[in-house]
Amino acid sequence: MSDNPWTDQIVGERMSVDQSFSTRIEQSQFSNQQWSLIMTATEFEIDNPDDPDRARIVANTDKIDGIIPELDNIQSGMGAMAGGGANGGLSTSSGSLVDSIKAALGMGETSNPSNNDQREAAKRLTQEYANELQSHLESKGRWESVRRSVADDN
């Protein structure tokens, strides 16, 4: 199911955090669809699992760059569903499909200021989610067992 067996242990807690975090997503610049894509590209890790005082869940967002162009496509599609534009919400910028494919392969340009803003916002929001997840695990008395299982696997 995942590369991190510890995340498989907390599926129920993740669902609970997803529900409580939905208000935060509504307040963000991302739609629910965009957030789902961001979460697909995010892996959660536990830093310093051997140290109970320093251990914390962190969002590994190394794969976010590959989905940034698709965030715009989702937004364009949503505009089309709301009656946006004669082109059905499809991007008409020169080479947009090729640019999206290049970016997904890690070959596209990453200097677009809008993309940088999205990237940074996605990174901040996923770390907020990681913090909320850890707080939730702590409140349910599950954090120590999860942390120890990761420490034992290292």
Image (spheres, rainbow, N blue to C red):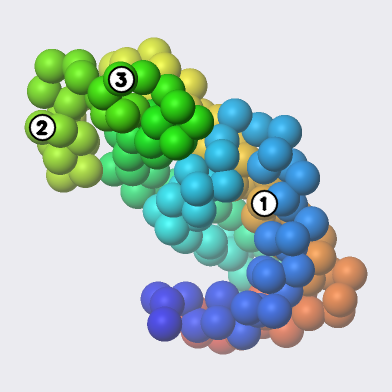
For this view, does 74 lie left or right of residue 126?
left
Q: Residue at x 59, y 29 (%)?
A: 29
- Expressed as whole percent of the image width and height from the top left, the position of residue 63 reads 35, 48
Report how far apart the C-alphas of labels 2 and 1 lie in the structure: 32 Å
Q: Give the quadrant of the N terminus.
A: bottom left
Question: Which is closer to the viewer, label 3 or label 2?
Answer: 3
For this view, does 15 lie left or right of residue 8?
right
What amino acid does circle 1 point to? Answer: Tyr
Marking on residue 86: 3
Determine which residue is flagged by label 2.
98
Asked which secondary structure carries label 2, the reply is helix
For this view, does 98 lie left or right of residue 19?
left
CB contact under 8 Å: marks 3 and 1: no
In the rendered image, which quarter is residue 12 located in?
Answer: bottom right
Report how far apart the C-alphas of labels 3 and 2 lie in the structure: 22 Å
What amino acid does circle 3 point to? Answer: Ala
Determine which residue is flagged by label 1.
129
State the residue in front, 12 or 132.
Answer: 12
What amino acid does circle 2 point to? Answer: Val
State the residue in front, 87 or 74.
Answer: 87
Report how far apart the C-alphas of labels 3 and 1 lie in the structure: 37 Å
CB contact under 8 Å: marks 2 and 1: no
